Amino acid sequence: MSEVRRTQVLVGVGRQDGLAAGFHLRRAGLDFAILDANTAPGGAWQHYWDTLRLFSPAAYSSLPGRMMPPQPGEPYPDATHVVNYLAEYEKRYELPVHRSVWVEGITRDSEGLVAATDNGIWAAQAVILATGSWARPFVPTIPGRSRFAGRQLHTYGYRSAVDFTGQRVVVVGGGNSGAQIAADLLPRATVRWVTRRPPRYLPDEIDGRALFDLATRRVQAATTGAAHGGVGALGDIVAVPPVRAARDAGLLTAHPMFATLGPTGPVWADGSSWDCDTIIWCTGFRPDLGPLTPLGLRRPGGRLAVEGTIPQPSAGGTPILEDPRVHLLGYGDWTGPASATLIGVGRTARTAVQQMKTLLK
């Protein structure tokens, strides 16, 4: 049996959220280890499509302690630039990242928490789960999905428009990914963009800078009890330059959601259809909370209630356990406004580490 490795705080995984936690854990003087299932630095950014751009300039896309340098000639850095920044950040702060380690489940013992991985056992006094959602793509249940004879993939599997040259492609989803991938495909494929409701573009002048300011005001409003509509009140899609250009040229037109899928493509409620080669589901992701299942912190298929980043018991239904030694980091507004963004996660990471330091005294 392999030796059990021990640390005060175990962080899973080495995404941007885990690196932000590592920065604050280092400053707090705590012993910690970061586990990463990837073989190289960069988190999910190394898996995105090749034309993806940040919504914000580099200065508004930084982790705590280290500004992201600008990318020459690019007002909005691309995914490769982000990967390089995260790799440099990890090296700069000498963060103890253990790679190609997949966390399978977390349990309790008499001394603390135990993480079973595909590369041995780790014991810790506290755990920060920062798995994000990239590994859990969501595809809605649509009648006839199994009948469609063409190719189906999710945003998770999209890499380049070149792969779809000359095809007829349906892109499903009215958020940023759907709009960006539809715009990306237009020069090479015949595209039909399908959304459940008419697309809502944020004002053209709004980018990640303004979104972070909105999230900050939301945090401030929460402390005073004031109402604040948040980003969702403005719209769903940031009009990055390629999306804006396709929209303004009249090429990015949304069609209503179809009712079913036939062997050759979608069929709408009025009986109309559109034959296609490929369907790309830009329909979002779900939090990857599988490692928590043995702890009894969540019901099957249910979202955890949280107070800040700490899971809390839900009212009603099957009781679940509470454990202040477990923190969830980087899952969007659910675990802190803008906490799924590069610049936003630093705030919640700092608070989580402060709470852990108090707990572990």
Image: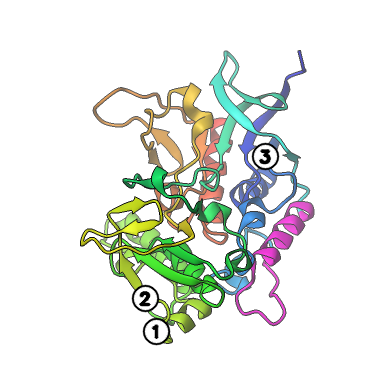
Task: Locate the C terminus by quadrant.
Answer: top right
Q: Which is nearer the N-term, disc 3 or disc 1?
A: 3
Q: Magenta segment range?
A: 67-92
| Residue drawn at point x = 69 percent, y = 36 percent | 32
Q: Nearer the viewer, residue 159 or 211?
A: 159
Left or right of 293, for residue 45: right
Question: How far separated are the C-alphas under marks 2 and 3?
Answer: 39 Å
| Residue drawn at point x = 43 percent, y = 56 percent | 337
Question: How far separated are the C-alphas under marks 3 and 1?
Answer: 42 Å
Closer to the eye: label 3 or 1: 1
In the picture of the structure, the residue carrying the numbered disc 3 is: 37
Quick check: is 71 in the magenta stretch? Answer: yes
Closer to the eye: label 2 or 3: 2
In the picture of the structure, the residue carrying the numbered disc 2 is: 253
Say which element carries label 1: loop
Which of the colour schemes (rainbow, by chain, secondary structure, one colour) is used? Answer: rainbow
Amino acid type assigned to the residue bearing label 1 in the image: Gly
Say which element carries label 2: loop
Q: Position of residue 314 (x, y in %)?
A: 31, 31
| Residue drawn at point x = 45 percent, y = 52 percent | 332
- For the residues bearing labels 1 and 2, Cβ distance under 8 angstroms: yes
